[in-house]
Amino acid sequence: SAAGAIVIDGQTGGTLYEVNSDAPQFPASTTKAMTALLIIEAGNLDKEIEIQAEEAKVGESSLQLRVGERYTRRQMLYGLMLKSANDVAHSLGRDNAGTIEAFAKKMTQRAKELGATNTNFKNPHGLHDVEHYTTPHDLAVIARYAMQQPLFRQIVGTKRYSWTRATPPGM
C-alpha cells in the first residue's frame, strides 16, 4: 500500500523490486541516516558537544537534552539512530555546520555526490517541511552507502540500548 518502494541488493546496488521509486516522499526520521553518515564522515567522534537552548526546545521524539549537558559525537550518534532523537539530530547538525540551514545544505550536497539526485534536505531530523523530500530510490542509495560504514553498522546493529545521563551509549 506504499506510494513508492524499492528493494536493492546491498552488495551490487542492483534493483530487485520497485514501485514508483522516483516519486518524491517526505522522509521523516529516515533523514537521520544522512545526518549520521555526515557526522561519521566528519570524524573526531570523541569531541564533546555542549547542548544549547535551541536543541533543548526541539520536540516530538527526543532524549530531552538539557542546556549545558555535554556528550561526545559518538554518544549522540547512538541516541540519534536508536532513539530517533530530534534534539540530538539538531545538536549534531549545529555542531557540524554552525547552523541547521548550513547542515541541510551539506546533507543535500552529499546526497547528490552519492547519486541521490532527487533529494532536498531542510533539517537533520526529518520534522516536516514541504521542501524536505527524497525518493525511495535516493533513500536506498543513501542507506546502502551508510551501511558500508563500520560504525553506522555497529550502531544500527545494537541490540541493547539504554540512555542514561551517567553513561550514555558509546562510552
Image (cartoon, rainbow, N blue to C red):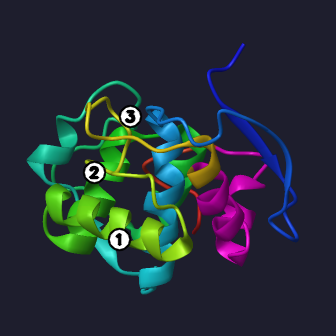
Answer yes or no: is residue 133 visible: yes
Q: Judge left or right: residue 1 versus residue 104.
A: right
- Of pointers 1 and 2, the one earlier in the residue sequence: 2
Amino acid of disc 3: Ser
Residue 90: image tag: 2
Residue shown at 28%/48% (left/top)? Answer: 123
Q: From the image, tell me which residue sits under label 3.
A: 62
Mark 3 lies on a secondary structure that is loop
Residue shown at 32%/62% (left/top)? Answer: 92
Nearest to the eye among marks 2 and 3: give it. Answer: 2
- Of pointers 2 and 3, the one earlier in the residue sequence: 3
Nearest to the eye among marks 1 and 3: give it. Answer: 1
Most common SS among magenta residues: helix
Q: From the image, tell me which residue sits under label 1.
A: 109
Mark 2 nearby-residue class (10 Å; few <14, some 14–19, many ≥20): many
In magenta stretch: residue 66: no
Quadrant (top left/top right/bottom left/bottom right) for the C terminus: bottom right
Q: Tell which of 8 and 103 is nearer to you.
A: 8
The alpha-carbon separation of the residues under discs 2 and 3 comes to 10 Å
